[in-house]
Image (cartoon, rainbow, N blue to C red):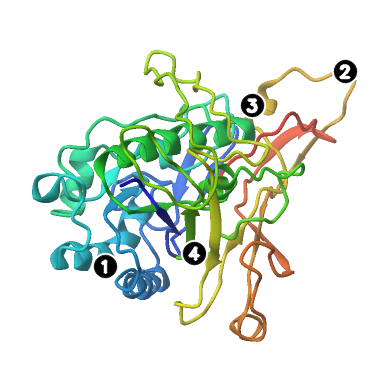
Amino acid sequence: MVLEVIYVVRHGFRSNWTVNPNTGDYIAHIKSPTGIASDPALASHGVDQAEQLGDLLQTLEPPIDVVYSSPFYRCLQTLQPGVKKLFEKGKAKGAEREQQGGVRVENGLGEFYGLARFDHPSPAPLEVLHTHFPNLLNPTYTRPLLVPSTRGESIPTLHDRIAYVLWRIISATDRSGVRALLISTHAATMICIGRVLTGEMPDNVAEEDFRCGTASFSRFRRRAVNIPGMGGKVGSGRTEREEVEEWKENEPERIPAIDWRDGNGIAGGWICEINGDCDHLDDGEERGWYVTLCFSFSFLSAPFPSPLPIFHFHFHFHFHFSYHSPSLLSSQKPHPIHPRPSPQFLYLSFSNLSLPFPPPIGPSNTSSTS
C-alpha cells in the first residue's frame, strides 16, 4: 500500500505583527505565546475557525493516518481541536501506531520570509512547543528534513524547498503503508504545495491558481504509482522512483533538485480534487493570499547609482490578499482549480523607510506571508 491522498490546510485567522526592514526588528501586536513576534497565536475568530475545521477533519475518507505541521504556533493551534479528537478515536494512528503517533513538526513546511540582510525569526524549538501542546506532538520526530535559511528565500527557492520536503515526506509514508496524510501550513507554502504536487507551475508566479484562505482545506489524490516491492496503484502517472540526495545542514541554502515542473509533479503526480475550500467555515473564505510583487529586504543595503534623490517618507509596503464576503461565497461555487474573481486588499505594512526613489526591484523575492 502506498500513499493515496494528501489533505492540506492553512492555519486560522491570526494576530498580526510588523517588521522594520532597516533593522529586522519584528514587533507583535499581541504578545506571542512563544515570545517570538512573528509566531502569533490565532485570533479569537481563528480559534472558531479551527473548531469548524476540526469538525471537517473527523469526516474525511480515507481517514487521516499521519499528520505533519509547520512548527509555527498558529499552525499547531489550528490542528489541535480536530487532531486531538482523531487521535482519541484512533483514526490518526500513524504508521508506527501508539509509540510514534502525534503531529510531526517539520521546519521544511514553515513560514516563507523574503531575502534579507538580517536574520528572520526562527520558530520555537520542540521542547518549547511540547509545553504548549502536550500530548499532541510526535515525541520521536526530532530531526527536520530541511531548515529554511534565516536570511530568507527567493520565490524559486521556496518552490524548491517545498518540492524537496514533500518528496521526502511522500517517500517515507510510501514505506509506512498509510493511505492519507494531513499537512498544516501557511499561505505561500500551501500555494507551492499545490503547484509542486500537480506539476502545474504558472508562467506568472502571481497567478491565483491554488486558493489558501484561513483554515481552508484542499485535497490531492495521487495519479499512479507502482513502486517496486511496495505495490499500490492509483490513477495513471509516472511509476519510477526518483533518486534524490539529502539536504545537508552544513549547506543549508543548497536544496536538492526535484523534477516536478512541466506537469510531472512529485512521486507520480497528484490531482487537485478540492482547492482551498471554505464551505465548512461559518464566514466562508477570508484572507486569501497570492504572490503578486517580488521583493527583497536586501536591496535596502545595496549600493545605488548616483545621482539619485533620496526621499524620506512614511512608506507602506503591502502584499495583496483576497477577501470574499459570505454573500459572494454563497452565490458562487468555484471550479476546483480555477479561482473566482475577487477584490484585492492590502496587508502587512513596513514603516519609516529611507530609500532612493524609485526603488530598484530585483529578482523574484518577497518578504512574508501569513
In the image, residue 337 sits, relative to residue 332, either above or below, namely: above
Q: Which marked residue is nearer to the observer: mark 3 or mark 1?
A: 1
At mark 1, the secondary structure is helix
Pointer 3 residue: 298
Mark 4 and mark 1 lie on one chain; the one further toward the N terminus is 1
Q: Give the residue type at disc 4.
A: Thr
How far, Cα to Cα, is label 3 from label 1?
A: 39 Å
What numbered label is drawn on residue 214? 4
Mark 3 and mark 1 lie on one chain; the one further toward the N terminus is 1
Mark 1 and mark 2 lie on one chain; the one further toward the N terminus is 1
Query: Horizontal and vertical percent for residue 318?
Result: 67, 51
Q: Which marked residue is nearer to the observer: mark 2 or mark 4?
A: 4
Q: Quadrant of residue 259?
A: top right
Crowd tier of the residue under label 4, counting other residues whose Cα lies within 10 Å: few below 14, some 14–19, many 20 or above = many
Q: Give the residue type at disc 1.
A: Pro
Mark 4 and mark 3 lie on one chain; the one further toward the N terminus is 4
For residue 31, say whether it is visible. Answer: no
Crowd tier of the residue under label 3, counting other residues whose Cα lies within 10 Å: few below 14, some 14–19, many 20 or above = some
